[in-house]
Image (cartoon, rainbow, N blue to C red):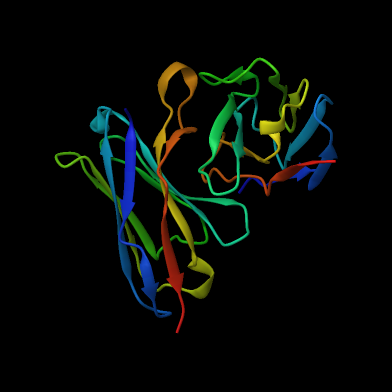
Amino acid sequence: QVQLVESGGGVVQPGGSLRLSCAASGFTFNTYGMHWVRQAPGKGLEWVTFIRYDGSNEYYADSVKGRFTISRDNSKNTLFLQMNSLRAEDTAVYYCAKDCRSGGCNYYIDVWGKGTTVTVSS
Amino acid sequence: EIVLTQSPATLSLSPGERATLSCRASQSVSSHLAWYQQKPGQAPRLLIYNASNRATGIPARFSGSGSATDFTLTIGSLEPEDFAIYYCQQRSNWPIPFGQGTRLEIK
């Protein structure tokens, strides 16, 4: 079945960097756009970024633009999120998520990983 | 950036009752709106897309309506498993934010 497994979370100091990975399986990864969505403790969902199936375009939330970079390796069915200049407000569970795509469902999310926790603290 | 405002913040109802949740966009998103359900400790689940289309496997008691700036998620008769947090999301323009959520709690 479709599976997304995030890794790379941890504790990092303000101003530091972290790289998240998401291993995808159970679907043709190189034909789907992918998202990262985060959720701060006790807070709502925040959409972070999206990358097209072939990596040709990326979109970012204003809160992370210029600091975070999404990328993918279709040969390894893996999605990445490079996070630089981290701030306390970036503390959250980060979900890797698959674009719905089919039947007019593009850019919505139909499959989510379990998430990886990022804590930015000194 | 389009802002989505959900109301009410919290809705207290009993099983069997009808729930009506609202999502308002700061500018028209046409019908490009989805609804998600999130239960504690779980990832969200897509319920409705393009304002009124149920996602695969979603029970018929969930329905969506609306267009432009005003949207509604209706749960026809609440089951115990429906008590959760509900989010809307637009895909009309990048970025594609979520609303702040509506908590549906048991009265």
| Residue B100: % across, % down | 68, 49
| Relative to B100, residue B83 above or below | above
Which residue appears at 16% of the width and 42% of the height?
A76
Q: Which residue sits furthest bottom?
A: A122
Hey, which quadrant is residue A30 in on the image?
top left
| Relative to A10, residue A58 above or below | above
Dividing the image into 4 quarters, which one contains the C terminus of chain B? top right
Hey, which quadrant is residue A3 in on the image?
top left
| Residue B79: % across, % down | 72, 27
Q: Which residue sits furthest left?
A: A75
| Residue B98: % across, % down | 60, 44
| Residue A84: % across, % down | 36, 69
Residue A105 vs residue A5: left or right?
A: right
Which residue appears at 59% of the width and 19% of the height?
B54
Residue B43 vs residue B5: left or right?
A: left
Residue A76 vs residue B18: left or right?
A: left
Is residue A3 visible to us here? Answer: yes
Which residue appears at 60% of the width and 42% of the height?
B39
Hey, which quadrant is residue B102 in on the image?
top right
Residue A96 vs residue B41: left or right?
A: left
Is residue B8 visible to us here? Answer: no
Count of labels in the image: 0
